[in-house]
Image (cartoon, rainbow, N blue to C red):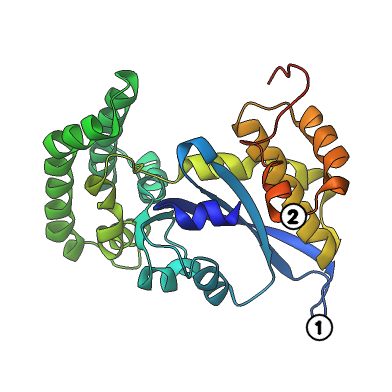
Amino acid sequence: MKDEVISYDIASCDATTLQVLNEPGRPAETKSYAYCIRGGPPEKSVVLYDYNDKLHKPFVKTWFEEFTGYLHVDGDNFFELIGEVANLVNCNAHARRKFEPVANGAKGKGLAKEAMRFFKELYKIERQAKDNRLTSEQRYELRQKKSKPLMDKFKSWLDELYPTVLPKSPLGNAMNYCIKLWPGLTRFLEEGRLEIDNNLTEQEIKPFVIARKNFMFSYSVEGAKALCIHFSLIRTAKLHGLDPYHYYVKLLKSVPHCKSVEDYEKLLPWNIKFDYPVIG
C-alpha cells in the first residue's frame, strides 16, 4: 500500500494523537501520533495509517523520501522537511479557520470578515467545479480564470493591511499564517487534480478519533502498529466499496496460503476476488 502512495505524484498527510502506555523510555501519559496518509492512483487509492512516537520531522521526511510530486498537508511544522523533496499543498480550510473566531466575535464589518469573504468566494468556485462534475483539466481552467485573480487580490490585501494590525493578535496571527504559507496555499492552482484543502484526509482521521474515544489508548508499540494496519485495511476496503467484514474473512482465510509477495498483493482491496457477490 505504501508503494502505491510513493509511486503516485499526489498524496496527502495528517496526524492525530495516540497514547501508548508501554513505550520504552517514555512515561505512559506521553502522546505519540498516528499518521493518516492518502494517495495512490484512482484505481488503487490507499488510506494508510502509520504510528510514530517521536522525532516527527525526520519520520515524515523518511516516509516520503522517494516520493516526488504534490503533498497535501496543514501548516504543522512536522511537514517542514518534506518541502525539500515534495511540493507542499497547504490547506486553505486551516487558513480560513484562523479568521473564523475573530470574525464571529467582531461587530460590524472588520478585517476578519473581509478575509472570510475571500474564502467564501474561493469555495463557491470549488462548489461550481464539483456540481458541474468538471474534469481535472476543466477545473484547472476554471481556477485560472476565477480563483487565481481572487487569490492575487487576497495577497495584495494581506500585504497592505498586515502591517496595520498587532502581529501577535489573533487577527495578526491569522494574516501571518497566510503570508508565511502563501506558496503552499496557492499551489492548488497549478494542477486540476489537487484539492483546495486537506479536508478529505481529515475526514479519514475522524473514524480513528471516534474509535479512540472508546479504546482510549494502546498498551504497547506492537498494539499501536497493529491498530494502524487494521485501520489501513478497513478504510481502504471501504474506499473501494468492499464490505469490511467480508473483506476481513476473505483476507484471514487467504493469508495462510500466501507464499510470495504477489500472493499478498492479490489480497489488496483493489485486487481481491470474491467467490460470491459482496454488497459494499
Q: Secondary structure at mark 2?
A: loop
Above or below: residue 59 compared with residue 179 = below
> 12 or 136, which lies in front?
136
Within 10 Å of the Cα at label 2, are there few (<14), some (14-19), or many (20+) other Cα atoms? few
Amino acid type for the residue under numbered disc 2: Ser
Residue furthest to the bottom in view is: 25
Q: Residue at x 53, y 68 (%)?
A: 60
| Residue at the disc numbered 2 | 260
Left or right: 101 in relation to 230: left
Amino acid type for the residue under numbered disc 1: Gly
State the image coordinates of residue 240 (x, y, percent, origin top left): 60, 31
> 218 or 135, which lies in front?
135
| Residue at the disc numbered 1 | 25
Mark yes or no: residue 86 visible: yes
Task: Report which quarter residue 196 is drawn in.
Answer: top left
**Total numbered labels placed on residues in the image:** 2
Left or right: 272 in relation to 46: right
Task: Report which quarter residue 250 is drawn in.
Answer: top right
Q: Residue at x 63, y 41 (%)?
A: 206
Q: Tags 2 and 1 in contact by the CB under 8 Å rule?
A: no
Mark sitting on residue 13: none
